[in-house]
Image (spheres, helix red, strand yellow):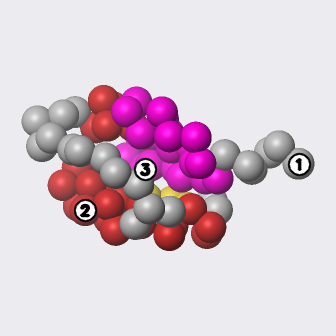
Amino acid sequence: PLEQMLTELSAYYRVEVEYRSDDVRSLRLYYQWEPDYELDKVVEMLSHFKAFTVHREGDRLIVESSQEGRQ
């Protein structure tokens, strides 16, 4: 699940994760992470998924459904 993956990444990079859409927490996806990736590269790679968006604001990752703002 996305929430589990981001919990592990946030601990590694020492950032917080803010979910602006609760429905994205349970999304299941496959992502192969390498520990030598910089956080900005991880964020850029995660931006390729269509079901959610993630961006960085300082030491915080903001996660929301791609459906937010389209209504």
| x, y percent for residue 47 | 48, 35
User: Going 63% across and 59% down the picture, which residue do you hit?
Assistant: 20
Identify which residue, 32 or 3, lies in the foreground.
Answer: 32
View extreme (left): residue:
36
Mark 2: amino acid: Glu
Q: Earlier in the sequence, mark 2 or mark 3?
A: 2
Mark 3: amino acid: Arg
Residue 20 is left or right of residue 35, and the answer is: right
Q: Nearer the viewer, mark 2 or mark 3?
A: 2
**Residue 5 appearing in the image:** yes
Residue receiving disc 3? 60
In the rendered structure, are the residues bearing label 1 and label 2 in contact, judged by CB atoms less than 8 Å apart? Answer: no
In this picture, is 71 found above or below 40? below
Q: Which mark is residue 71?
A: 1
What kind of element bears circle 3?
strand
What kind of element bears circle 2?
helix
User: Going 52% across and 50% down the picture, which residue do you hit?
Assistant: 62
User: Going 73% across and 49% down the picture, which residue do you hit?
Assistant: 67
In this picture, is 33 found above or below 1? above
Q: Nearer the viewer, mark 3 or mark 1?
A: 1
Q: Earlier in the sequence, mark 3 or mark 1?
A: 3
Q: Which residues are magenta?
A: 44-65
Residue 2 is left or right of residue 34, and the answer is: right
| x, y percent for residue 25 | 51, 67
Residue receiving disc 2? 8
Report, in whole angstroms, how far the alpha carbon at label 3 lies from the one at label 1.
Answer: 26 Å
User: Going 83% across and 43% down the picture, which residue do you hit?
Assistant: 70
Report, in whole angstroms, how far the alpha carbon at label 1 lies from the one at label 2.
Answer: 32 Å
How crowded pointer 2 is (Cα within 10 Å; few <14, some 14-19, many 20+) is rated as: few
Residue 69 is left or right of residue 15, and the answer is: right
Mark 1: amino acid: Gln
In magenta segment, residue 31: no
